[in-house]
Amino acid sequence: MTATQNNTVAPNAAEYGGGMKKKNDANKSDEISALVLDPGYSVVRGGFAGEDVPKSVVPSFYGIIPSGPESKRLYGENAIHTPLPNIEIGNPISRNGIVEDWETATNLWEYAITSRLTNAKPGNPMTNGLNEKTDDLQQEMEGVEMQERPLEENPLLMTETGWNTGKGREKPIEIAMENWGAPAFWLARSGVLSAFSAGKASALVVDIGAASTSVIPVHDGIMLKKGTTRSPLAGNYISDQLRLIFSTSQPPIPMTPHYLINSKTPVDAGAPSQATYRTFPAGTEPHPSFRALQEERILTEFKESVVSVWSPGRLGGHNQQGGTNLDHARTQAARPFEMPDGYNQLFGEERYRAVESLFDVKMALSDAAHPLPSPNQTLPALIQHSLSQVDVDIRPHLLANIIVVGGSSLIYGLNERLKQELEALYPGPRVRIFSPGNVVERKFSSWIGGSILASLGTFHQMWISKKEYDEHGPGIVEKRCK
């Protein structure tokens, strides 16, 4: 059977055939593994097809350092978390998952590939201070730059969102073929790959990421575009809810990032922190965007260790005893959390409230900068709208094969609550939710699906070759990669 994205059987990990053939000097064939690149708003995941996890996981955020008339860009985990003078934080991808700055995105993706997977481009010997600048050396270096490309020997499979634009689909193949010298290319929908990673060709994929939540129906390996829905109620939204909870508490809960703390002294729960703070010389302070990113790290830790989804029922509803679930939540065991400056507190109902508006917008907190979300942006509403747009005959099958993935889906109790909400909406059909218990599989599901697909021996004939690209141009992606 041909391994295309519209096959009726999901790719099986046991079929790994792996890569392309390369002739060596002894006229023997060596396997050349394809590379899989899965860019997202929060991180870029890269690795070799056929492997279980991506070897390269790089933040999508980058540092900007003022340097004369132009700014210097820094990539990687260490670069964006070091408080360099005047450092600013940027992201080439918008919150809706669409690339806005292609030049920076290209450099970021190349860094993700060359830092861990292939060799970086050779440095220019004319700029190392050891060589005189001559025309001969200039010409030689130009030749080397043309020869040394990061993907000369590796075909590339890239992922895309289900709502990608026409330019957003064509630009990656241009970059892969013209900038990186890739011999072959394929563009795959992330929702379809998440279904493949779970061993399913048909499923309803619920992806709760950092910037957005999407619901993508997949049938026989094809994404049903009409049924694709998305919402901004995701990880960053939960962080905004936590910020509002902290700022409206009495007294307000401080949130000072690690880089501003010199030392701290242990204090009792609820007592003001006793810390000494770091100061920066005037004019060298990091940009507010740097502090926002460091605060997000605190909030991520808080979400992982404290936040939970309330069940059974809704937090704003009533229980069988006649009382409110909110009052009941206040009697539950609270969870402690300590801020970087030593301030610590027990969090009871707050840990449920932060995420409740993913299911019930009436429980959302708001201010001028964070308006109330719409009822049709909640998780149950997204799924209901998605199913209403697909053929009635396949709805029961999709409800019985719901796959929940994405880093923000790891919040404790989310799957159980989602199942309760859907069973209330659809009392007839059977509702089954599949979600990897392994954190890595949950966060990297689309990359893993791409690793499976690109390593199948039967996938060879699907690649768009360099010759085809030269003949038809980047528009071939629209025709071939459905």
Image (spheres, rainbow, N blue to C red):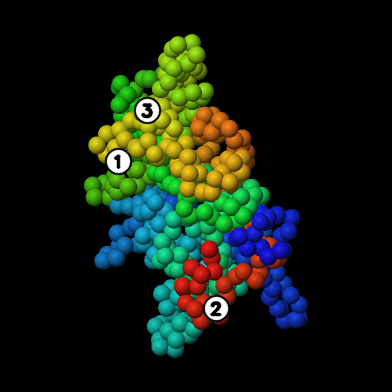
The answer to whether residue 373 is visible is: yes
Residue occupying the far top of the picture: 321
Marks 2 and 3, the one that precedes in the sequence: 3
> Which mark identifies residue 321?
none
Horizontally, residue 394 falls left or right of residue 349, namely: right
Marks 2 and 1, the one that precedes in the sequence: 1
Residue under circle 1? Answer: 279
Q: How many marks?
A: 3
Q: Comparing marks 2 and 1, which lies closer to the viewer?
A: 2
| Image-quadrant location for residue 74 | bottom left
Quadrant of the rendering where the N terminus is positioned? bottom right
Residue under circle 3? Answer: 363
Give how far apart the Cα atoms at labels 2 and 3 are: 54 Å
Q: Give whichever of 164, 82 is nearer the camera.
A: 164
Residue occupying the far bottom of the picture: 136
* Residue shown at the point (30%, 52%) measured from the top left: 86
Give how far apart the Cα atoms at labels 2 and 1 are: 57 Å
At label 3, the amino acid type is Met
Residue 424 at x, y percent in the picture: 52, 29
Q: Comparing marks 3 and 1, which lies closer to the viewer?
A: 3
Q: Secondary structure at mark 1?
A: loop
| Image-quadrant location for residue 364 | top left
Residue under circle 2? Answer: 468
* Residue shown at the point (35%, 43%) measured from the top left: 292
Q: Secondary structure at mark 3?
A: helix
